Image (cartoon, rainbow, N blue to C red):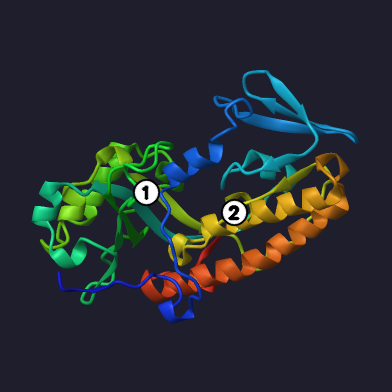
Amino acid sequence: MPFSSSSGPPGPPPSSLSHRAYTVDRNTFREAMLTGLEEHVFFGKSFVRYEEFPDKIIAHFADGTSADGILLIGADGVRSRVRKQLIPNFPAIDTGMRIVFGKTPITTEYLAATPETHRTGMSLVTDLDDKDQPTPMFESIHFPYTGKVEAPQLPDPYMYRVLVFHRDVIPFSDEKSWRFTPEEAANLARQLTASWDPALRPVIAHQNTSQSSVRSLLSAHLDIAAWDPSGRVTLLGDVVHVMPPTGAMGANTALRDAADLVCRILKAGGAGKVDSQVIGEYETDLREFAKKAIDMSWKGGMKSFGLRPIEECESIVL
């Protein structure tokens, strides 16, 4: 398998980036964000529906319990039940691409089996002879403050890797893509890379099988249709503007949503002062910013990962 490898990011060219980019370990980031919130965050609940009233909103859960509040923020991912109630039949796009995520510990054995050029930085590999081959991207993740930071506990260094391929290569149902076990996902990665050049195979051969997953690459439309704003319910992140990860903008856009919403709540004088106008202005800006991020993601995907033009992709309802 002849291949070419580049060390630049799969989005815009490096010269267009005005600031240094940092790679974040999401588990560590999540732990840091939860610090100090232990008494306010609860797990093990499955949201079912909400009831909206002039002075409050009630969230109902699958176990029969409920919780009252002033503002409900749907941040429950692509298959959001909050969005399904607020915006039924939300239109989206199936890119036709599928992705296998994974991590490979940077161990002595891995380093011994891997060419030095693939041990650091980011690599994007393309097959020059077979466009149906999955496109891998892998990046070394190190933690220079290990031993200096007490909490959260920093993980050992690893290679973060993705395999992007069209669903025609190995067909499986969209429902199945959300139900792969980690072992099944790891096996799929092995299957997809069985014919790879020996210089590339160690990143799969030494993978942590418990850290592998499969996802469909879905996207919101560039022009997200407006909806009537509610004074008690709003959305952020993949709930409303899922995008291909090929522009490295998804999590950043969600964080931007959260920061903007917090600023608007504070400016209004607290969550109790938020109304449909405040929420409507937030959602208008969200759609405008999301359009730019989605566009960047598609351009990066078409350039480096074989994404097809939006016009050639399937329209779906989330």
* Disc 1 from disc 2: Cα separation: 32 Å
- Around disc 2, counting alpha carbons within 10 Å, would you say few (fewer than 14), some (14 to 19), or many (20 or more)? some
Residue 187: horizontal and vertical position, in percent? 23, 44
Q: Is residue 92 above or below residue 2?
A: above
Label placed on residue 35: none
Residue ID for mark 1: 172
In the current view of this chain or complex, which residue is farthest to the right?
54
Q: Residue furthest front?
A: 148
Determine whether, in the image, residue 142 is placed left or right of residue 13. left
Q: Amino acid at mark 2?
A: Leu
Residue behind mark 2: 255
Q: Give the vertical position of 199 relative to 52 (above or below).
A: below
Residue 190 location (% of width, % of height):
20, 50
Q: What residue type is disc 1 on? A: Phe
Residue found 68% across the figure and 45% down from its top: 83
Crowding near pointer 1: few (<14 within 10 Å), some, many (20+)?
few
Q: Quadrant of the N terminus?
A: bottom left
**Left or right: 192 with respect to 82?**
left
Whether residue 165 is visible: yes
Mark closest to the chain's N terminus, 1 or 2: 1
What x and y, as percent, mark residue 180? 36, 40
Circle count: 2
**Residue 225 x, y percent position in the rendering:** 72, 62
Please tell me which residue is depicted at 75% across the width and 57% down the height of the picture.
283
- Disc 1 secondary structure class: loop
192 lies above or below 155 = below
